[in-house]
Amino acid sequence: MAMALRPIDNALPVTPERPKKQAKVVVPVQKGNDENQAPLPPSADATIDYVSSENLKPLTDPDSNNFIEGLDSKDWVKVCETLNNARRLAIFHSDLLLPSLEKVMVVLMKSMKNPRSALIKTSIMASADIFNAFGDRLLDTSTSNAFDQLLLQLLLKASQDKKFVCEEADKALKALVQSMTPLPLLQKLRPYVSHSNLRVRAKAAIPISNCVSKMGLEEMNQYGFVPLLQMASDLLNDRLPEAREAARSIVMGMFKAYTENEEDKQEAWQSFCQANLSPIHSQSLLKVVTSSQ
């Protein structure tokens, strides 16, 4: 007697004796999915198409009200399709996406927590497009909380072992730095260099160093030279080399800005470090500058 198919939620690979049954259940993603098609099994993650931003095309009917319905779908493939439509809206019709931006960001955050690697990667790619499209507007009161949660998830995904997810998260963090004013983004990133997860600390340190490299003396003064110096000192003693390298970049950016109008740059920098750090930490920061010259 032929074995009945298991419920889709617990689907197992179909036995070689019943290839026709498998063809009826597994539907290739490239042909599209609708609510009447069966969900794909876990092994089908690799069949999701990852379309780069430059290859996305405008929607023929850019109506965000229609696309919003797909965000609430329980079919992860449908959510992937909807997030790709959100990317297209962000790139070509950002004004239409703006009223739904907070909801989209919440879905992005939840999708990054999903065990489906394909959904995680799609949500990260969508995040990068949204960063590029909206920039500082993501820090508005209406979306600030959703942005904070999304930022944490991006740092966590950039810290994990799955390489293709980690690399995509790194790209999204780089897009984030490029699309936002450095000072408010630095303030958002600052808490994560004290995170209990050392990988998160390192991943946060990298965009922080990129922010500092874009800041001048006035912006550093607005943030606070002493807190910035203390943060760099802490990172310089971090366990991971990525964090220490980011710290060295921060120190050099600060040194350049702080001593810009000083005749004796080394002496000015030494006095500043010694006045605000312990002798051993002060010496570490002085060594960064001298070794780079």
Image (tube, rainbow, N blue to C red):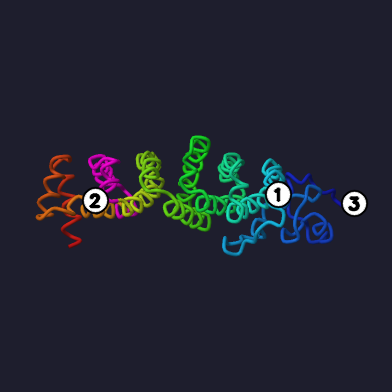
Q: Main secondary structure of the magenta part?
A: helix
Q: Is residue 31 found left or right of 249 in the rendered image?
A: right
Q: Secondary structure at mark 3?
A: loop
Q: Is residue 235 magenta?
A: yes
Give the percent coordinates (x, y) of residue 9.
73, 44
Find disc 3 in the rendering and name its residue.
1
Q: Are marks 2 and 1 in contact (CB under 8 Å)?
A: no
Q: Earlier in the sequence, mark 2 or mark 1?
A: 1
Viewer-nearest of labels 2 and 1? 2
Q: Find residue 145 and report its horizontal and vertical position in percent.
A: 50, 35
| Inter-mark Cα distance, 2 to 1 | 47 Å
Report crowding for label 1: few under 14, some 14 to 19, many 20 or more residues within 10 A (C-alpha).
many
Helix, strand, or loop for circle 2?
helix
The amino acid marked with disc number 1 is Lys
Relative to 26, say whether 111 is above or below: above
* Residue 78: numbered disc: 1
- Measure how far apart labels 1 and 3 are at the Cα level: 35 Å
The question of residue 58 being in magenta is answered with no
Residue range in magenta is 216-245
Residue at mark 2: 254
| Residue type, label 3 | Met
Q: Residues within 10 Å of mark 3 (few under 14, many from 20)?
A: few
Residue at x 63% of width, y 47% of height: 96
Q: Disc 2 residue type?
A: Met
